[in-house]
Structure formats: structure tokens, C-alpha cells
Image (tube, helix red, strand yellow):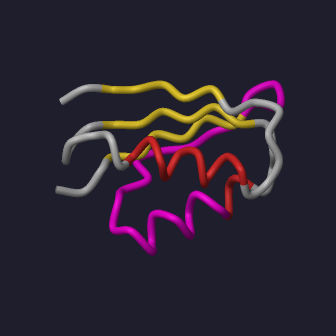
Amino acid sequence: MTTKVLDLKGLKCPLPVLKARRTMKELAGGDILQVLATDPGAVQDFQAYCEATGDTLLEWGEADGVFTFRIRKSA
């Protein structure tokens, strides 16, 4: 199991979730993608993305205007 970090700060909706989706395709089941984003709309986008794909949003949080999402790829 590996963790990949994707820095998408400064990008506006829907680019963060689209770029994350592309990266998730490269990962193996069980791998984790950590996404850094600054667009507040990313919160709803990543929640909806995980519901649609079956990937798991392990956690998300915000500090100093930067949102961090940890997503586990489904098997």
C-alpha cells in the first residue's frame, strides 16, 4: 500500500476532482491518495466522487485555507 500526494492548490472546481480522478486510475486497490486543494467546493466534490466511485474518503480537514483529503482506492 502506498500513499501519493497530489498538490492541487489554486485550482478551481471541477479541476481538483478531475485531476484526482485521473491519478486514482494509476493507483492499485488499497492505495491512498492525499489531495491538497484550496477551493471550498472541493469538499462536496470529493464526497460526491467517493460515493459515485466506491472509493473511501478516509478523512478530510482544513487548515489555513488548505483542504486535505485522504482517499483510499477501492479494490
- Find residue 53 and report its horizontal and vertical position in percent: 39, 68
Task: Give above or below for 57 relative to 38.
Answer: below
Q: Residue 55 lies in magenta, yes or no?
A: yes
Q: Judge from the rendering whether residue 22 lies leftward or rightward of residue 42; answer left or right.
A: left
Task: Give above or below for 52 relative to 23.
Answer: below
Residue for point 54% across, 29% down: 6
- Find residue 50 and report its horizontal and vertical position in percent: 45, 63
Among the 4 quarters of the image, the one containing residue 52: bottom left
Task: Give above or below for 51 relative to 10.
Answer: below
Among the 4 quarters of the image, the one containing residue 46: bottom right
In the rendered structure, which segment of residues is drawn in magenta?
A: 45-66
- Find residue 43 and report its horizontal and vertical position in percent: 68, 55
Residue for point 75% across, 30% down: 9
Residue for point 56% across, 70% down: 48
Q: Residue 32 lies in magenta, yes or no?
A: no
Residue for point 61% across, 35% down: 68
Quadrant occupied by the C terminus: bottom left
- Find residue 21 and report its horizontal and vertical position in percent: 49, 52
Q: How many marks?
A: 0
Q: Judge from the rendering whether residue 28 lies leftward or rightward of residue 44; answer left or right.
A: left
Relative depth, front residue between 19 and 4: 19
Quadrant occupied by the N terminus: top left
Among the 4 quarters of the image, the one containing residue 28: top left
